[in-house]
Amino acid sequence: MTVHKLGGGDMARPRLVSDDAILDATRQVLAELGPVKLTLAAVGARVGLAPPTLMQRFGSKRGLLLASAARSPLMVKLAADEAAARNTSPLATLRDFALSAVAHIKHREELGNGLGFVQLDVADPEFRQHALAHSAAIVDSCDTFYRAAVEAGELRADTDVPALARHTLVCFNGALQVWAVNGWGSLTEFLTEQLDLMIGPYLRSDGVSARSGLLPGHDGLQRDPERAADSDRAES
């Protein structure tokens, strides 16, 4: 007796591991090994899939890396939305957005592996297309935060928001590369210092910016408002 399945043919087996899970694993392996040493086997081991299965999904190692790169602008938008949900101050949101992107990085070698992707972004037109979209997503998110900071009175009204948003991308990427070589303190501390130095000149001079954790002053460095208040009381 022949058993006929619905649809008149074999039903496709459900995917037990999503593409997003595979791409998350790809990001982890990239941080550990870099794009050159990354293998389908290494990624598959993270999610319990054999290399041939990844070949069916993405076509090749290059296809997997391109899929990972193509998803990066969406990941930036998600990170920006999550930072906004955790904060009420626009400048605190900006800092959260930047620092959460590097919170998992503890060793300089991890950044070195990630920077290997830059070679692909420069030399390969398809990867460069995704890199440009990734950069644009960061700049757009920063632009949104800075415009909100101006409206909230945290930044001066005459702040050149588009220029500052682009400068933030330069500051962020530059800080990562400098820290990868020099390893000055923790990455979060180093990046916080660079962001505060960059934003400092644009802060309101009447103390309004204090609620973001960035107090107006000559150096623009981050200070905790409660500790600052305690220090001021002690001095008086």
Image: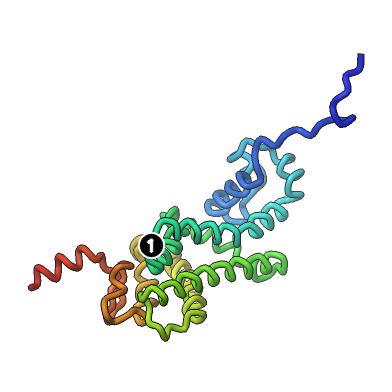
Across and down, in percent, residue 116 comes to: 58, 62
**In the figure, is residue 83 to the left or right of 39?**
left
| Residue 33 vertical position relative to residue 163 in the rendered view, above or below | above
* Number of on-image labels: 1
Position in image of residue 151 (x %, y %): 41, 75
Identify which residue, 232 or 171, lies in the foreground.
232
Q: Quadrant of the N terminus?
A: top right
Q: Secondary structure at mark 1?
A: loop
Residue found at x 50% / y 81%: 163
Task: Name which quarter of the figure residue 51 lies in.
Answer: top right
Q: Residue furthest bottom?
A: 158
Q: Residue furthest front?
A: 151
Question: Which residue does the image show at 58% across and 69% down from the upper left?
Answer: 135
Q: Which residue is mark 1?
A: 88
Judge by depth and name the residue closer to the eye, 14 or 186.
14
Quadrant into which the C terminus falls = bottom left
3 vs 152, left or right, is right
Q: In this picture, is 181 found above or below 17?
A: below
66 displayed left or right of 222: right
The one nearer the camera, 70 or 207, is 207
Q: Amino acid at mark 1?
A: Thr
Q: Position of residue 159 (x, y in %)?
A: 43, 83
Residue sitting at 60 percent across and 59 percent down?
A: 74
- Percent across and percent down for residue 66 are 69, 58
Residue at left offset 28%, top offset 71%: 210
